[in-house]
């Protein structure tokens, strides 16, 4: 196992390094603009490189759960869609239409759909005939919620790792934990490129990365809920900051008569960076907020019951929305 891990880390580094060099050679770069924070053209292929590394992990590690391997395979396709979007700037309709393909495949042909939202002692939220469209909408929302967090170096990577760490804690199955570690390793190496540590060529995740991570985590959550391994409300708490931010931004845009699909600087990381003037603090505050809120949800679930935990999830969102409205840029 140690040989496989070392090989995987080395392969991940080489893939990221090669991808960065090729990206700059062929102008696969994100150009500076008034809306964007960077001042130099930067390779946008970090997410695509991570997806290639994950494909190699299927060959290197003995993971017998076909669902995990299939999620990685379809995630590569989702990453390709993000790469196409980064290169050709697809319109919203075209982007969402392409995203539906790998999502629909896992839902229909692999039966990875939400059948219920949990048992709350007094009632059980069964989805019944709306299970497939509900799962499709939830997956699309969460995948694009990840895209909302890709605006400051490291933010999406660190916050995604906070989710994977929570899931590592929630489900002590060795194969599942290995699967999570396999995902975390290339993300960790990517961060060295993202921050240009040791003078490595700088890379962004790009849409290929945000769609990749959003897709993988979405279907990990669906798999865990579908197998009745973890209560859905705890899974919701694991991604709480993504859910709150996605809903808040869109509610506030509707309130202010703004275009829901127009890229802007009204996201949480922009607000925090403006207040703290520190990328490190911005990333730390977002990741630690997700973890702290999860801890609150977890203990409300353990000490009381799922229904109390659900009510707290809604209450904390209302508080979050009020604060976001007050401190919007």
Image (cartoon, rainbow, N blue to C red):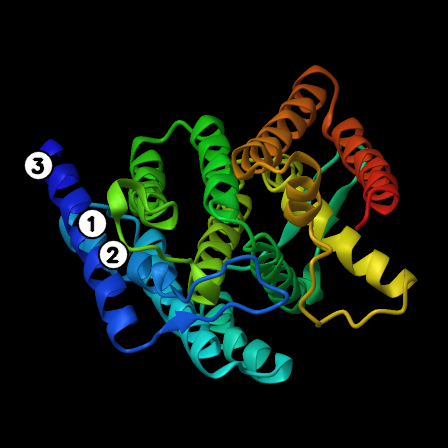
Per the image, the residue denoted by label 3 is 3
Q: Image point 32% across, 60% down: which residue?
A: 51
**Does the rendering let one see residue 255?**
yes
Residues at circles 1 and 2 in contact by the CB criterion of under 8 Å: yes
Residue 250 vs 153, above or below: the answer is: below
Count residues near mark 3 (Cα–Cα under 10 Å), then give few for <14, some for 14-19, many for 20+.
few
Please state if 236 lies on the left or on the right of 67 as rendered.
right
Q: Which residue lies furthest to the top in this view?
A: 303
Q: What kind of element bears circle 2?
A: helix
Per the image, the residue denoted by label 1 is 13
Residue 140 location in percent, x, y? Answer: 60, 65
Q: What kind of element bears circle 3?
A: helix
Most foreground residue, 232 or 177? 177
Q: Which of marks 3 and 1 is nearer the N terminus?
A: 3
Most foreground residue, 81 or 303? 81
Dividing the picture into quadrants, the one containing residue 206 is bottom left
Q: Image point 46% across, 74% down: which residue?
A: 86
Please state if 139 lies on the left or on the right of 274 as rendered.
left
Please state if 25 lies on the left or on the right of 138 as rendered.
left
Most foreground residue, 270 or 224? 270
**Does the rendering let one see residue 121?**
no
Dividing the picture into quadrants, the one containing residue 319 is top right
Per the image, the residue denoted by label 2 is 16
């Amino acid at each position: 196992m140690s040989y496989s891990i070392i090989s995987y880390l080395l392969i991940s580094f080489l893939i990221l390094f090669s991808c960065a060099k090729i990206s700059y050679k062929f102008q696969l770069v994100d150009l500076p603009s008034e809306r964007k924070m960077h001042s130099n053209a930067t390779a946008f292929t970090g997410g695509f490189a991570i997806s290639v590394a994950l494909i190699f992990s299927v060959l290197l590690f003995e993971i017998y759960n076909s669902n995990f391997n299939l999620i990685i395979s379809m995630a590569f396709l989702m990453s390709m869609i993000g790469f196409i979007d980064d290169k050709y700037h697809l319109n919203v309709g075209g982007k969402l239409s392409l995203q539906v393909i790998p999502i629909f495949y896992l839902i229909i042909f692999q039966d990875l759909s939400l059948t219920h939202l949990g048992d709350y002692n007094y009632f059980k939220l069964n989805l019944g005939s709306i299970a497939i469209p509900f799962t499709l909408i939830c997956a699309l929302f969460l995948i694009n919620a990840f895209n909302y967090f890709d605006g400051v170096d490291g933010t999406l990577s660190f916050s995604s790792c906070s989710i994977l760490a929570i899931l590592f804690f929630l489900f002590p199955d060795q194969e599942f934990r290995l699967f999570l570690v396999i995902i975390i390793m290339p993300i960790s190496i990517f961060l060295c490129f993202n921050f240009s540590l040791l003078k490595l060529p700088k890379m962004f995740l790009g849409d290929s990365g945000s769609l990749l991570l959003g897709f993988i985590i979405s279907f990990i959550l669906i798999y865990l809920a579908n197998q009745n391994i973890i209560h859905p409300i705890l899974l919701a708490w694991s991604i709480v900051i993504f859910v709150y931010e996605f809903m808040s931004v869109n509610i506030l845009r509707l309130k202010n008569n703004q275009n829901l699909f127009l890229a802007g600087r009204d996201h949480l990381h922009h607000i925090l960076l403006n207040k703290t003037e520190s990328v490190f603090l911005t990333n730390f505050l977002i990741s630690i907020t997700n973890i702290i809120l999860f801890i609150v949800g977890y203990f409300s679930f353990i000490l009381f019951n799922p229904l109390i935990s659900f009510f707290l999830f809604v209450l904390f969102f209302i508080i979050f929305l009020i604060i976001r409205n007050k401190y919007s840029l």
